[in-house]
Structures are given as structure tokens and as C-alpha cells.
Image (cartoon, rainbow, N blue to C red):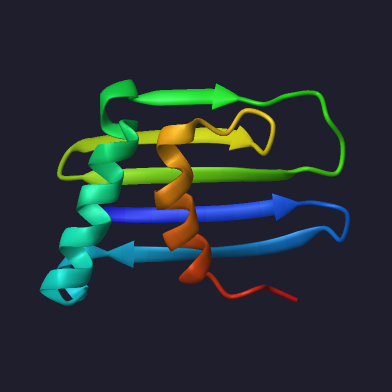
Amino acid sequence: MIVTFRQTGGIAGVRRGCLLDTSAMGEIEAHRLIELVQGAGILKRKSTKQLGSAQDVFEYLIRITDGRLTCSAHFDDTTLPDSYRDLLKLLQEKSPMEP
């Protein structure tokens, strides 16, 4: 499974992101990532885009590729599903800030 993450926006125009490949991770770390993706329900939705109209909020894009299946979720702070919170936290921890 490959997880691509991008976070942009906010007052300071923050940009951060990462690409995580479970085949290149340790077994425990890979299992945790897969568990969080499944718990979020992203794979069941195929593709979602939920953006509110608020300004200066963070926008998030999560793309999952697992074999031939690709799905994505695009949302912001005002539309963040509760089921995504733990996954988002992990992805932010793995994502360095970009200049």
C-alpha cells in the first residue's frame, strides 16, 4: 500500500507532505498505517472531496494506492471526518514542513 499525503494552507501558507510505502516500512509500522487507513474508511469511499468555504484553514489530500485500487480524500479543517483524525495525525508526524 502506498499512501501519499499533502497538507497546504493555513494563515502561513504551510506545505508539508509525505509518501509512505508499507513494503518499505517495518512490519509494526506498516501494520499500524494499514490499520489507520482501514479505520478511516477511505478505501470504502473511492474518492471524496469535501471543502468548506472558510479561509485560512488547512487543506488535506490523502491518496491511497493498494494494488490496482486507487482512492483519495480531499478535505479541510472544517470538513475533516472524525474517522480520519488518527490517520491524519500519523501522516503529519511523518511529513516535514516544506520551505
| 30 displayed left or right of 79 | left
Name the outermost residue toward the left: 27
Q: Is residue 25 above or below residue 87?
A: below
Left or right of 40, for residue 67: left
Q: Is residue 1 visible?
A: no
Up-down relation of residue 80 to residue 91 (above or below):
above
Residue at (62% x, 54% y) in the render: 7
What residue is shown at x 21% (from left), y 52% (from top)? Answer: 34
Quadrant including the C terminus: bottom right
Using the rendered view, name the quadrant where residue 54 is placed. Answer: top right
Nearer to us in this view, 97 or 79: 79
Point out residue 17 in the picture as x, y percentages from the top left corner: 55, 63
Residue 96 shows up from this direction:
yes
Q: Quadrant of residue 90?
A: bottom left
**1 horizontally vs 97: left or right:** left
Where residue 80 appears, x then y in whole percent?
A: 57, 34
Q: What residue do we see at 47% from left, 24% from top?
A: 48
Count of numbered badges drawn on the protein? 0
Residue 9 point in image, percent of width and height: 77, 51
Return the x and y of residue 52 as percentages of the image width and height: 73, 24
Q: Is residue 27 above or below residue 78?
A: below
Residue 65 left/right relative to 94 = left
